[in-house]
Amino acid sequence: MKLPVSEHTRRPWRIHAYAHDFAVEDVWSYRTPGAGPDDFPVMLAAMVEDGGFSRQSAPARFLFSVRWKLGALLGWDDPRAGLGTRVRSLRERMPEELTGTVGSEPGGSPFTPLYELPDECARELANRTVHTVMHLGWVEAADGDHELRMAVLVKANGRFGRLYMSLIAPFRYLIVYPSLTRQFERAWRERAAGRS
């Protein structure tokens, strides 16, 4: 479910101190019935076990395939346009106490891990269009259970990056985020069923 940006900005997440020059593009919540305050690592493990990006819906996989092919053709994803070349990694702004909490990203994710704490984690990606952060947080919901929240923080690369974000917005809202919702919520249900 899409949430107002304030649902991310009003919480005391560690990412705020390091991504203050990024815009919060999207905030989404994912239901995790029966989840408790200490289940964030369980949810992250469930997402990895579920197959991560490789197990998205066929329409979402098709969109990402088209995006990667266009990126290769137009040079959007050239290594010289990414982290450490076109833009500095947010890891350079962070203390080792944070960056030392993660290793490499499993499951073929295009994102590079920044940190992972008991109630939040962040991963980043940069290319010729944007520098973006995917922030995942663990929040108590109105019913007392805890749920997963995802915020997408973006720093567009000039006018082209802003145009790119505008052009892909309908695809994000109609295909990508609904697909992620089904995937993340299914991963939780299957993990929870396996623990019972």
Image: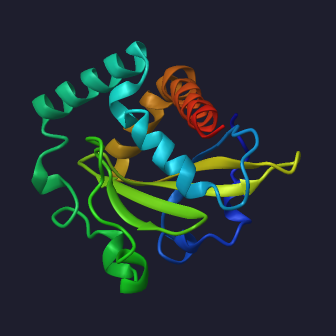
- Seen in the picture, residue 63 relative to 41 is either above or below; the reply is above
Identify the residue at image location x=36%, y=71%: 90
- Seen in the picture, residue 14 relative to 37 is either above or below; the reply is below
* Quarter of the figure with residue 87: bottom left
Of the pair 97 and 171, the residue shown nearer to us: 97
* Quarter of the figure with residue 110: top left
Residue 109 in the figure: left or right of residue 139: left
* Quarter of the figure with residue 162: top left
Circle count: 0
- Seen in the picture, residue 159 relative to 123 is either above or below; the reply is above
Identify the residue at image location x=64%, y=47%: 148
Rendered location of residue 139, percent (x, y): 72, 56
Name the quarter where the N terminus is drawn: top right
Of the pair 150 and 85, the residue shown nearer to us: 150
Identify the residue at image location x=43%, y=18%: 57
Of the pair 168 and 9, the residue shown nearer to us: 9
- Seen in the picture, residue 127 relative to 196 is either above or below; the reply is below
Rendered location of residue 19, percent (x, y): 48, 69
Rendered location of residue 101, percent (x, y): 39, 73
Identify the residue at image location x=52%, y=28%: 183
Residue sitting at the far right? 143
